[in-house]
């Protein structure tokens, strides 16, 4: 799935009136709350339809009393191209529990009410500015994580990263024969992965990997530079060596190397999400590095 999809589906609630007070003057506007999803994601579409009806897939809101006057209404679904659009009207600021703490509610030229996250709001203000409540700039919808779409201003850090990720996904996978122990690889996963070599489990040979990620708080607390891959890897291995074993991981690009010649696997992540005991891995006392 592309992070900057070519086509979108927009799920629209029925029109409603919003009211606000600005400098002592009451202002009203007719809007249609909108939820954008890629056209190739049935799961996100299901979530959006549930949102439009006034309840979640998990059933947090189950009655008209909880859901308000529009509870249970069927939304309108349109297919639209993910073209660049210009300018947004700032309406108000709300708190969100998903995808960030704050979101600015903005209006598109069609009168659709959508969220603009605070980081993209700042990028817009600093790069293009605002005039009379209008946020200037060229915008597109991008995928954030696996389950959310966000507005990004063209040229922002988020937008550029999405374009780079899409270019990466278009590459051919690196063959397993070309993997290097200690290599840091990227692919269709959230964090960079370090290849640790091959291990034997229940008579079969698997690849061993560890995610190259430690949050900024723990890196700073340990007095380590947050952009040092080797320091991050050493901390990760020392404090949380949760190794994943898979038959074969699809990787698309090697971005760096870390020194991993002394590693011996102490535990590995199993298929069920739990840990496999050390005793269940054959040949565990052999260094991972150098195994063929």
Image: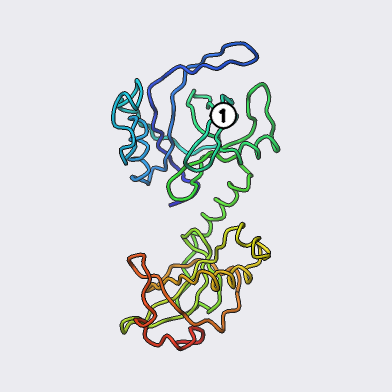
Total marks placed = 1
User: Which residue is nearer to you in this view: 202 or 186?
Assistant: 202
Please give the name of the residue rendered at 36% of the width and 83% of the height, measured from the top-left corner. 279
Q: Position of residue 122 (x, y in %)?
A: 65, 38
Residue 87 or residue 6, whichever sits in front? 87
Residue labelled with disc 1: 93
Q: Residues within 10 Å of mark 1 (few under 14, many from 20)?
A: some
Q: Residue furthest front?
A: 221
Quadrant in the picture for residue 62: top left
Q: Pick whichever, 201 or 135, lies toward us.
A: 201
**Residue 65 x %, y %:** 32, 23
On the image, the x and y values in percent for residue 42 come to 33, 45
In the displayed structure image, the side of residue 241 where residue 248 appears, left or right: left
* 232 shown above or below 46: below
**Relative to 30, residue 237 above or below:** below
Residue depicted at 51% across the width and 54% down the height: 166
Tag 1 secondary structure = strand
- Whole-percent x, y for residue 121 in the image: 62, 36
Q: Is residue 58 left or right of residue 20?
A: left
Q: Quadrant of residue 213?
A: bottom right
Q: Quadrant of the C terminus?
A: bottom left
Q: Quadrant of residue 8?
A: top left
């Amino acid at each position: 799935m592309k992070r900057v999809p070519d086509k979108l589906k927009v799920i629209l609630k029925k029109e409603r009136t919003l009211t606000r007070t600005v400098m002592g003057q009451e202002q009203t506007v007719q809007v249609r709350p909108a939820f954008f999803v890629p056209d190739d994601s049935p799961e996100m579409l299901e979530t959006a339809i549930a949102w439009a009806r006034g309840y979640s897939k998990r059933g947090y809101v189950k009655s008209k009393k909880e859901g308000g006057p529009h509870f249970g209404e069927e939304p309108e679904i349109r297919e639209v191209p993910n073209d660049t659009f210009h300018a947004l009207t700032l309406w108000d600021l709300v708190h969100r529990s998903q995808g960030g703490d704050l979101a600015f509610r903005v209006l598109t030229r069609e009168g659709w009410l959508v969220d603009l996250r605070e980081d993209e709001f700042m990028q817009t203000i600093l790069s293009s500015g605002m005039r009379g409540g209008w946020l200037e700039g060229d915008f597109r919808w991008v995928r954030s994580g696996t389950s959310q779409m966000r507005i990004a201003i063209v040229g922002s850090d988020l937008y550029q990263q999405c374009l780079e990720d899409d270019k990466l996904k278009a590459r051919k996978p690196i063959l397993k024969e070309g993997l290097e122990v200690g290599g840091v690889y990227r692919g269709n996963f959230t964090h960079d992965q370090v290849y640790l070599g091959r291990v034997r489990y229940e008579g079969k040979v698997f690849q061993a990997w560890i995610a190259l990620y430690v949050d900024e708080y723990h890196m700073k607390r340990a007095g380590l530079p947050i952009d040092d891959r080797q320091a991050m890897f050493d901390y990760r291995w020392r404090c949380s060596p949760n190794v994943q074993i898979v038959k074969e991981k699809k990787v698309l690009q090697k971005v760096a190397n870390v020194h991993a010649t002394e590693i011996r696997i102490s535990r590995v992540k199993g298929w069920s999400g739990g840990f496999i005991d050390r005793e269940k891995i054959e040949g565990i006392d052999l260094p991972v590095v150098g195994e063929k």
